[in-house]
Amino acid sequence: MHIEPGLVDAGKIWLSHATVAGTGAYTLMLAREAMRERSLPSLMARTLATTALVFCFFEVLPHHPVGVSEVHFILGSTLFLLFGAAPAAIGLALGLLIQGIFFAPFDLPQYGMNVTTLLMPLFAVSALARRIIRPDTAYVDLTYRQALALSTIYQAGIVSWVAFWAFYGQGFTVESAMPILAFGGAYMLVIVVEPLVDLAVLAIAKRANRLRGNALVERRLYEVA
């Protein structure tokens, strides 16, 4: 996920520092909860896994510039279901940072905007999951409709935040709206594909029952409250 350099000029980029501070504080709260629920080694192992996957998502999977940003298969809802909210959030932030440092240093000034764009929708997924998934349902037993809802809220959140940064930086005009519409339209493909990926991964996890209780995966993947 890359907000195009120059989309928000230096005089306005201060807002991204405020938003990333908020997402960082919330991520730390989630991390403390994750450590109380499992352990620090479990959180670290899951974070390492998500960081590696996020880096691969950005560098290996197909990605194309469209309008004001790039279309990526980020698979945020998949990371959430497999590893939990805190490891997914930290992994997204670290994977993006590693990519920026070693492969795309021109993206570092936009790091705060990009992290906010990735993490705020993830937090929305976490909140939605508590509402639409019954407490007695393990993640491996999700339906397509539930997976679609989680994926849609994540991808819609990304498009919304990209649109916000674009309008914030360029103003609300017809000229600024057209690239945003092109970007949002391109993301429709991701919304179609990601739930299928989620269900495929969950089906594999359900067959790999030896992962039950493993510190490397989210406990709710197999166990219910």
Image: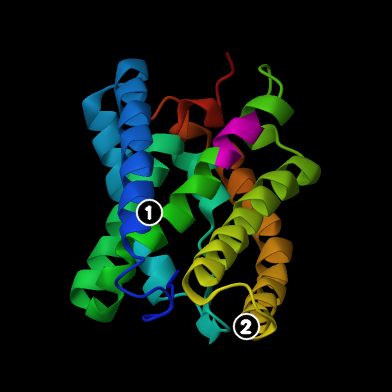
Neighbourhood count class around disc 2 (C-alpha, 10 Å): few under 14, some 14–19, many 20 upward? some
Q: Position of residue 117 (x, y in %)?
A: 47, 57
Question: In the rendered structure, which amino acid carries the disc numbered 2?
Answer: Pro
**Mark 2 — residue?**
179
Q: Which residues are magenta?
A: 124-129
**Mark 1 — residue?**
92
Query: Looking at this rendering, what residue extends furthest in the left direction?
Result: 102
Q: Nearer the viewer, mark 2 or mark 1?
A: 2
Quadrant location of the C terminus in the rendered image:
top right
Q: Position of residue 25 (x, y in %)?
A: 32, 35
The one of 51 and 7 positioned closer to us in this rendering: 7
Q: Main secondary structure of the magenta part?
A: helix
Left or right of residue 65, residue 115 in this image = left
Residue 160: which quarter of the image? Answer: bottom right
Question: In the rendered structure, which amino acid carries the disc numbered 1?
Answer: Leu
At x 27% / y 70%, what residue is drawn?
A: 109
Q: Secondary structure at mark 2?
A: helix
At x 69% / y 54%, what residue is drawn?
A: 195
Q: What's the CA distance linking mark 2 and mark 1?
A: 25 Å
Mark found first going from the N terminus, 2 or 1? 1
Left or right of residue 165, residue 101 in this image = left
